[in-house]
Image: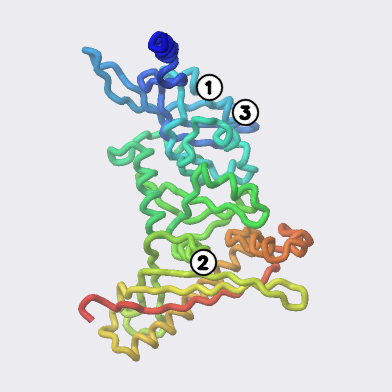
């Protein structure tokens, strides 16, 4: 009797086995990238999509195409794309979201509400601001034989590793958007000659709106190091204006390790932030010749001064942009919540005093020296 009951139980479990929410790839159009631009009071969007194309004999091969639509909201856009793509339009494999700079100057949260709520969203999708319209970056589909999505993704990975850009994704963007003590930073991408792509720098935000200002090149890298958000390495070139020979004017260093500490103190009721950044560096290029111990110490002091000057330019840009990319408000909020509440951060941030100091330590000046 007991055996009969067990067999009956197993017979009931068989129909329920497996996933109830199956979605077959051959029935989907997989979106790999999507761009959003302002289009009057609507959105213009272009998505790069991969579908499986029958080749005969029951075989299929991937086929990539681009589709352009308009809609009032991202959900409208998705519905419009679903109407014109083969099978079901799916964002589950989405790699990059591009936002045109003019659209980014508005509140960008509405663009992400769908992704935050959708269970199948890829939380590792990267987010980028484009110099110009995003659809212009995606419309050609390929760059030098590579799918545009792959080209952008590889460019971003390289930029993150070399401390050129931050690493925002759909997954980590939400917490920053709703943190009153810090502002968003996103990679800024531009097109150069022949449609090639270039990482322009870091787009600076005030709350959820692009300020129109950015940090470019080495200043972008230095911001990331000041936030302890740098990649594996960062490269900086310093000009020695006192050098007589043109070839000797440029000194290039590569960071091996960095550590930043931001402190808040009060002076007559006003906040003063100090940033202490320590850099361990390799000398990558120094054309004046071999360095002895005294030369190394002297060069380290020179580099420290130059890097401190650059850090001052970074903090000045942040103040002028009214962009708390360093999360200074968050530090005040933790240390003294009542004083933080008393600050009109939008109004007062431009007058916040920030004093950066960079200390360079040379750990190697070449494998032969």
User: Mark 3 vs mark 1: which is more N-terminal?
Assistant: 3
User: Against 350, is 204 above or below?
Assistant: above
Q: Nearer the viewer, residue 105 or 120?
A: 120
Q: Residue at x 44, y 69 (%)?
A: 258
- The residue that mark 3 highlights is 72
Residue 109 coordinates in the image, percent (x, y): 62, 41
Q: Residue at x 45, y 40 (%)?
A: 96
Q: Residue at x 41, y 23 (%)?
A: 29
Q: Label 2 neighbourhood size at 10 Å, few (<14), some (14-19), many (20+)?
A: many
Query: Which residue is most to the front?
Result: 1
Q: CA distance from mark 2 to mark 1?
A: 43 Å
Q: Is residue 319 left or right of residue 218?
A: right
Give the alpha-carbon distance from disc 2 to disc 3, as whole Å: 39 Å
Q: x%, y% of residue 73?
A: 61, 30
Q: Is residue 15 visible?
A: no
Q: Considering the numbered disc 2 on the image, is that residue within a helix, a strand or a loop?
A: helix
The residue lying toward the viewer, choosing from 63 and 281, is: 281
Q: Residues within 10 Å of mark 1 (few under 14, many from 20)?
A: some
**Quarter of the rendering containing residue 54:** top left
Q: Which residue is mark 1?
A: 80
Q: Secondary structure at mark 1?
A: helix
Regarding residue 58, the answer to whether it shows in the image is yes
Q: Earlier in the sequence, mark 2 or mark 3?
A: 3
Above or below residue 74? Residue 3 is above
Find the distance from the CA under tag 3 to the CA under tag 1.
11 Å
Residue 369 in which image quadrant: bottom left
């Amino acid at each position: 009797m007991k055996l009969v009951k067990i067999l009956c139980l197993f017979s009931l479990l068989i129909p329920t086995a497996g996933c109830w929410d199956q979605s077959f790839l051959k029935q989907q159009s997989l979106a790999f990238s999507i761009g959003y631009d302002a289009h009057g009071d609507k959105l213009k969007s272009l998505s790069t999509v991969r579908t499986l194309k029958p080749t005969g004999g029951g075989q299929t091969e991937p086929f990539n195409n681009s589709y352009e639509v308009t809609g009032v909201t991202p959900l409208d856009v998705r519905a419009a794309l679903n109407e014109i793509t083969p099978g079901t339009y799916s964002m589950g494999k989405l790699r990059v979201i591009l936002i045109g700079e003019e659209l980014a100057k508005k509140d960008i949260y509405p663009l992400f509400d769908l992704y935050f709520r959708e269970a199948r969203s890829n939380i590792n999708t990267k987010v980028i601001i484009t110099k110009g319209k995003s659809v212009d970056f995606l419309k050609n589909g390929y760059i030098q034989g590579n799918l545009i999505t792959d080209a952008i993704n590889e460019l971003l990975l390289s930029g993150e590793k070399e401390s050129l850009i931050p690493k925002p994704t759909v997954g980590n963007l939400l917490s920053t958007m709703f943190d009153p003590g810090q502002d968003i930073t996103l990679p800024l991408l531009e097109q150069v000659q022949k449609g090639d792509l270039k990482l322009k720098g870091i787009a600076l935000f005030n709350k959820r709106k692009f300020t129109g200002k950015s940090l470019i090149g080495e200043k972008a890298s230095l911001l990331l190091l000041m936030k302890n958000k740098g990649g594996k390495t960062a490269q900086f070139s310093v000009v020695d204006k006192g050098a007589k020979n043109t070839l000797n004017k440029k000194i290039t260093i590569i960071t091996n390790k960095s550590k930043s500490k931001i402190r808040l103190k009060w002076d007559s009721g006003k906040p003063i932030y100090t940033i202490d950044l320590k850099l361990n560096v390799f000398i990558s290029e120094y054309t004046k010749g071999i360095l002895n111990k005294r030369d190394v110490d002297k060069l380290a002091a020179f580099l420290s001064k130059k890097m401190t000057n650059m850090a001052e330019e970074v903090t000045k840009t942040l103040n002028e942009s009214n962009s708390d990319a360093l999360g200074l408000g968050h530090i005040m909020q933790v240390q003294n919540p009542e004083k933080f509440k008393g600050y009109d951060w939008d109004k007062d941030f431009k007058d916040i005093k920030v004093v950066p100091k960079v200390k360079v330590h040379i750990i190697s000046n070449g494998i032969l020296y």
